Image: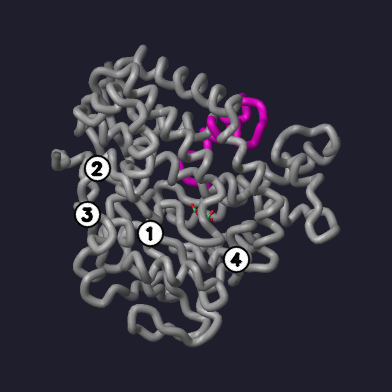
Amino acid sequence: MPTKKCPFSDFPDPFAAAREAEGIQEIDDQGDPVKMVLGHRNVRKSAHDWKTFQSGARPGRIVVPSEVNIRDIRQIPFETDPPEHTAYRALVEAWFRRPLEEAYEAALTELINSELDRALNAGAMEVVHDFALPLQSRALTLLLNCPRQEAEHWIGWGTHVFRSDDDPLDSGKANQLYDYLDAEIARAGKDPENGTDLYAHLLRAEYNGRKLTIEEIKGVMILTFAGGRDTVINAVTNTLAYFAGNPEDLARLKENPDLTTRAVEELVRYFSPLTHMGRVATKDAEVSGCPVAANTRISLAWAAANRDPGVFENPNEVVIERKANPHLGFGFGIHKCLGAPHARQVLKVLINALARRVNKIEVTNYEDNTEQWGEFERKVGFHRLQIQIT
Ligand code: EMZ
């Protein structure tokens, strides 16, 4: 059954024509251009080829918009290449898979149900700030294994740690996060042997026969705070908007909860919370028949690849039971999202709770959050989503 197109639950694909024509499109970013790679095959191929397209460039340069002017700390393992990347990732991989444990899922279920209690009691809310942001922050305390109370502080930082309403690259905001992390690492450093949070885990870790430096620990923590923030907030908000516009899908999930796992993947494909991520060419190369000069940037446009009609049938429809779903919503290759197990669990538990407990979601007002990439205008979520929920 085709998706009913509601203005708020429809996320159009702005890349269709360019993906079909050249498959690559250059955009400007603060004077450091980026060639966006748009087709599924070429995005995967370039992501796989880390020797040619590196992540360990100047800190902040692989992010689009570039963050070179607001930070000089390398995010780890995200802004490194093998062999360093392999060793760093090994230190954190098991920790970031804890979301798959039963006790973690139980705690997350309790947490999300109490957020939903709050929403149902109120009957109406603004989803981005009153639901998705607090949910993301409180769920993050599970990933860090730190007191739930810490989240109240993070909620005050807003939906992005480096962006504010009037400044897409806010160095003041970045410094607030850095100061907070310095204090937290110092706190954990007083008793690293007995600590049970991520800071203590990192303080105890051995990297190539030595302890991590404070700078490296900070690099991991910045990524943990920044990488899963606006992305998770958008995914949660968009999920509520989607079910408001497509109540029949929520009803199907209620009848058939086994579909939830597939629904999570399909919604991540459709929303693609992170539009793209950059790489820097280590040598002259070619992508999609287009030359890429050494030391220039490409970006792997996950969002464009995820609507590639050569890979996905009816790419612009949400097909919650979609079987083969090789989407790139969590990236691809050695850098694929470290936080994906946590994000998937958040969405799974949320969708289960909505299907079991919610009869109706009605959108009463909203303001889209659209990104502008050169000529492409892409809806990625909402600035505001006002709903009634029963
Ligand atoms: C970086 C990035 C990571 C970047 C997976 O994405 O997320 C962005 O939101 C941050 O601004 O610094 O962490």
Disc nearest the viewer among 1 and 2: 2
Tell me what residue is drawn at x 41 percent, y 83 percent.
286
Quarter where residue 101 is shown: top right
Residue position for label 3: 313
Rendered position, 335 above or below 346: below
Evaluate whether residue 22 shows in this view. yes
Label 4 CB-ligand 1 distance < 8 A: no
Which element carries disc 1, helix, strand or loop? helix
Residue position for label 2: 319
Q: Evaluate if marks 3 and 2 touch, with contact meaning CB atoms under 8 Å apart.
A: yes
Disc 3 to disc 2, C-alpha distance: 10 Å
Disc nearest the viewer among 4 and 3: 3
Q: Residue furthest top?
A: 121
Give the left or right position of residue 325, taking residue 202 as reference. Answer: left
Image coordinates of residue 65 in percent, x first then y, are 44, 63
Q: Mark 1 is on which residue type?
A: Trp
Which element carries disc 3, helix, strand or loop? loop
Residue position for label 1: 302
Tell me what residue is drawn at x 46 percent, y 33 percent.
346
Disc nearest the viewer among 1 and 3: 3
Disc 4 to disc 3, C-alpha distance: 38 Å
Q: Mark 2 is on which residue type?
A: Val
Which element carries disc 2, helix, strand or loop? loop
